[in-house]
Image (cartoon, rainbow, N blue to C red):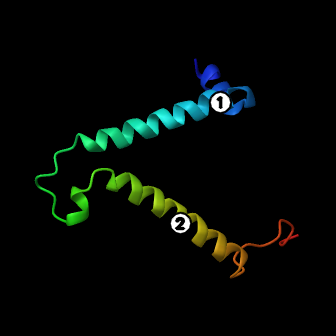
Amino acid sequence: MIKHVIHFFGDEEYARPRRRLFYLVLILIVAADFLVSRENAEYLWDRVPGWSAVYGFVSCIVLIFVSKFLGHRVGLMRREDYYD
């Protein structure tokens, strides 16, 4: 069983089904957010359906760009043979 899971996530021949699975899970998560009761929301943006998914996606993208900036421009990243 675990062998099939490893092949599914590792082999290039399963790239198309993996992508479809990813999109299906993404759609289900956003759709589930529309089913949540919003009557006790504390902030205005908590009442917007799909806000959590958008906020999480944008936060992830910002985190990636900040990490790349710190690594490449600020100089935190070193060559592979830096300590040799």
In the rendering, at what x and y percent does residue 31 appear?
Answer: 33, 39
Sequence-first tag of 2 and 1: 1
Q: Which residue bears the numbered disc 2? A: 63
Q: In which quadrant of the rendered view does residue 35 lie?
A: top left
Tell me the residue at 21%/43% (across/down): 36
Tell me the residue at 52%/67% (across/down): 62
- Image: 83 above or below 22: below
- The outermost residue toward the top is 1
Characterize the local packing of mark 2: few (<14), some (14-19) or many (20 or more) Cα atoms within 10 angstroms.
Answer: few
- The outermost residue toward the left is 39
Q: Which residue bears the numbered disc 1? A: 16
Q: Would you say 4 lies left or right of 26 here?
A: right
**Do the numbered discs 2 and 1 sit on residues whose CB atoms are within 8 Å?**
no
The total of numbered circles placed on residues is 2
Q: Where the C terminus falls, by quadrant?
A: bottom right
Amino acid carrying mark 1 in the image: Arg
Q: Would you say 63 lies left or right of 30 here?
A: right
In the rendering, at what x and y percent does residue 81 appear?
Answer: 87, 67
Tell me the residue at 38%/35% (across/down): 28
- Image: 54 above or below 21: below
Q: In which quadrant of the rendered view does residue 13 lie?
A: top right
Q: Where the N terminus falls, by quadrant?
A: top right
Element type at mark 1 = helix
In the rendering, at what x and y percent does residue 17 appear?
Answer: 61, 27
Amino acid carrying mark 2 in the image: Leu
